[in-house]
Image: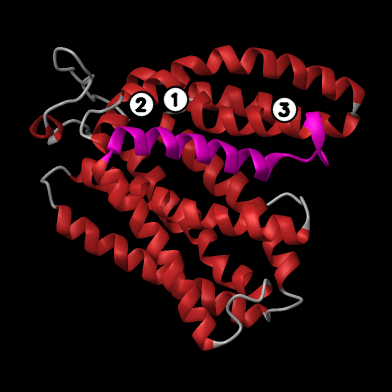
């Protein structure tokens, strides 16, 4: 991401006039490639939610599957509506729940204090660490997603160092006591180094597509194929992936603001937010509670 001007606030607040966002961001080629990887590699990992629902017994008939899809899309639509109504608050909440979701996916401790520390450290670095390393570059991205209402998101990012310093100290103490935590601690240190040197969208794409998606797909595949055949899993995932791509393409054509960078950011990240809420409810709620606390 290069060349984006910092957003100018109105007197008395951070909210920008919507017209000021029309040419707010301009993404370079590597950032556009990163977004493409998010769409092509990262986004489809949520398409396995149909197989998870079937594994849990929520979609083993066509009627049940249709009911599951209606509820899932209804929740996603509610997120989009809330984002349109309160974009600044919606972005802040999206960052927070994404950090929790990523943290759950990376945590290896069985439970208790060590697991909480891992969730806070890994999820926080994956979301707020990237933003903190590149706040000047990330703030215009936030503005493009919220029509300039970046205050809450920036406040959360700037507050993050106050949280991560004690969390890092506790993580080191826990790793001294439990050697099983050390590989993930080393991984986190390497991720911090990576996030600090690569552009923010590239860092996010690498984490989301390689680490989070890779772990999620591997463990979901191992757990659900006892109830759902591999062919059916792949067929469902392919169908849901194509449907999400089609929906995104329609939204991209509908926006057509004249700024492709802004349109792509809005479609991809608001779309991710919309899908993350039902995905978290299914994966981090129902599935994890039913099948234990394995890494997802």
* Nearest to N terminus: mark 1 or mark 3: 3
Disc 2 from disc 3: Cα separation: 26 Å
Q: Check disc 3 and report its element: helix, strand or loop.
A: helix
Q: Residue at x 52, y 24 (%)?
A: 129
Give above or below for 112 relative to 137.
Answer: below
Residue nearer the viewer, 103 or 35:
103
- Are the residues at dot 1 and dot 2 in contact (C-beta closer than 8 Å)? yes
Q: Work out whether residue 173 can be spotted.
A: yes
Question: Which is closer to the viewer, label 1 or label 3?
Answer: 3
Q: Residue at x 60, y 17 (%)?
A: 163
- The residue where tag 2 is placed is 138
Q: Residue at x 55, y 14 (%)?
A: 161
Checking the image for residue 131, the label placed there is 1
Q: Check disc 1 and report its element: helix, strand or loop.
A: helix
Say whether residue 27 is magenta: no
Residue 166 shown left or right of residue 176 in the figure: left
Which span is picked out in magenta?
Answer: 86-114
Asked which quadrant contains residue 139, the reply is top left
Q: Work out whether residue 28 can be spotted.
A: no
In the picture, the quarter occupied by the N terminus is top left
Give above or below for 138 relative to 50.
Answer: above
Question: Which is closer to the viewer, label 2 or label 3?
Answer: 3
Q: Percent position (x, y) of residue 251? A: 23, 59
Q: Residues within 10 Å of mark 2 (few under 14, many from 20)?
A: many
Q: Percent position (x, y) of residue 282? A: 59, 59
Q: What's the magenta bit mostly, secondary-structure-wise?
A: helix
- The residue where tag 3 is placed is 117
Q: Residues within 10 Å of mark 1 (few under 14, many from 20)?
A: many
Q: Percent position (x, y) of residue 17? A: 11, 29
Disc 1 from disc 3: Cα separation: 20 Å
């Amino acid at each position: 991401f290069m060349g984006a001007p910092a957003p100018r606030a109105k007197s008395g607040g951070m909210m920008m006039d919507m017209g000021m966002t029309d040419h707010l961001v301009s993404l370079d080629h590597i950032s556009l490639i990163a977004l493409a990887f998010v769409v092509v590699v990262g986004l489809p990992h949520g398409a396995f939610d149909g197989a998870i629902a079937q594994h849990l017994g929520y979609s083993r008939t066509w009627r049940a599957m249709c009911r599951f899809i209606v509820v899932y899309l209804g929740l996603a639509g509610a997120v989009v509506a809330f984002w349109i109504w309160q974009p600044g608050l919606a972005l802040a909440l999206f960052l927070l729940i994404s950090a929790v979701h990523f943290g759950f996916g990376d945590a290896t401790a069985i439970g208790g204090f060590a697991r909480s520390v891992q969730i806070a450290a890994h999820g926080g670095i994956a979301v707020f660490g990237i933003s903190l390393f590149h706040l000047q570059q990330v703030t215009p991205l936030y503005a493009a997603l919220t029509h300039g209402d970046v205050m809450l998101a920036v406040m959360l990012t700037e507050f993050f160092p106050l949280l991560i310093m004690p969390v890092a100290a506790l993580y080191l103490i826990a790793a001294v006591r439990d050697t099983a935590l050390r590989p993930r601690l080393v991984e986190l240190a390497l991720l911090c180094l990576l996030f600090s040197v690569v552009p923010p969208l590239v860092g996010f794409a690498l984490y989301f597509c390689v680490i989070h998606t890779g772990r999620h797909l591997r463990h979901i595949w191992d757990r659900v194929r006892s109830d759902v055949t591999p062919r059916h899993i792949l067929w469902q995932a392919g169908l849901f992936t194509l449907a999400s791509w089609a929906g995104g393409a329609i939204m991209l054509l509908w926006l057509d603001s004249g700024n492709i960078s802004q349109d792509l950011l809005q479609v991809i990240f608001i779309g991710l937010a919309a899908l993350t809420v039902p995905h978290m409810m299914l994966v981090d709620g129902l599935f994890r509670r039913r099948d234990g606390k394995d890494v997802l």
